[in-house]
Image: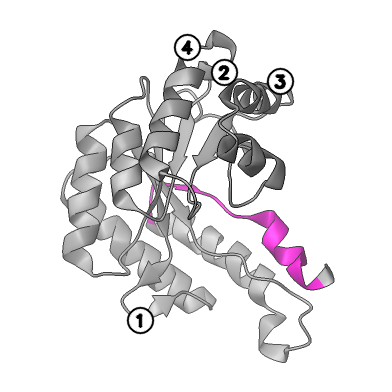
Amino acid sequence: MTELSSARFINIGERTNVTGSAAFKKLILAGDYAKAVEVARQQVENGAQIVDVNMDEGLLDAVEAMTTFLKLIAAEPDISRVPVMIDSSKWEVIEAGLKCVSGKPIVNSISMKEGEAPFLEQARKCMAYGAAAVVMAFDETGQADSKARKVEICKRAYDLLTGIGFPAEDIIFDPNIFAVATGIEEHDRYALDFIEAVAELRELCPHAHFSGGLSNLSFSFR
């Protein structure tokens, strides 16, 4: 990341995500892309420095929806001035999105869930498209749910990525923030585990960035 690299805190707008916004999902399912584009515009006007786009909905052709929407917002100078985060659990959707964006996109996300070989294959494709990548703290045995596991998985991923020439400044780790105050004692450290893991990883993984879903903390209060 270049223009954002000097910023201390980056706001990611997630209203253009069908899995997180019922209103946006309704617009996309109705094919009302004009109003959907306005959602992205409002995100940028309200201070979003990155716009996250997710079309993972069973009733949608996610590839078509992603490419249609990305092309539309690319034609809007007041939206396209900020990076797009192409967010999907399906690599084919991410790659379709990468093919139709300009500037420097961000892939959300890649992980070692399926092992090192698929992880590095996707990382190489990110490099080929000039994209940064969110790297989840997730390996073959599951999500990192302790400080030690967060550090272990992210450091392993960092070494693998930099080993193939992936720019460290294009790595955005998501070490997982889980809900607190669930009534389960071992969950009480979840927030501290995230903070302490990031502090340690900043030393172990020079130039990498970090992302976290802060709203995850409050799930148990809803």
Tell me the distance, in whole angstroms, between the alpha carbons under discs 4 and 1: 42 Å
Q: Please name the amino acid that badge 4 sits on.
A: Ala
Residue 207 makes an appearance in the image: no
Q: Nearer the viewer, residue 10 or 113?
A: 113
Q: Please name the amino acid that badge 3 sits on.
A: Glu
Mark 3 vs 2, N-terminal side: 3
Q: What residue is drawn where x is 48% and y is 50%?
A: 56
Q: Which residues are magenta?
A: 205-220
Q: Please name the amino acid that badge 1 sits on.
A: Thr
Q: Mark 2 — residue?
A: 79
Closer mark to the observer between disc 4 and disc 1? 4
Q: Which mark is residue 172?
A: none
Would you place residue 31 above or below residue 219 in this image? above
Would you place residue 174 above or below residue 148 in this image? above
Q: Mark 1 — residue?
A: 141
Q: Mark 3 — residue?
A: 45
Residue 182 location, x and y as percent?
76, 81
Mark 4 vs 1, N-terminal side: 4
Q: Secondary structure at mark 2?
A: helix
Pointer 3: residues within 10 angstroms few (<14), some, or many (20+)?
A: few
Q: Quadrant of residue 154?
A: bottom left
Q: Mark 4 — residue?
A: 75
Tell me the distance, in whole angstroms, between the alpha carbons under discs 1 and 3: 41 Å
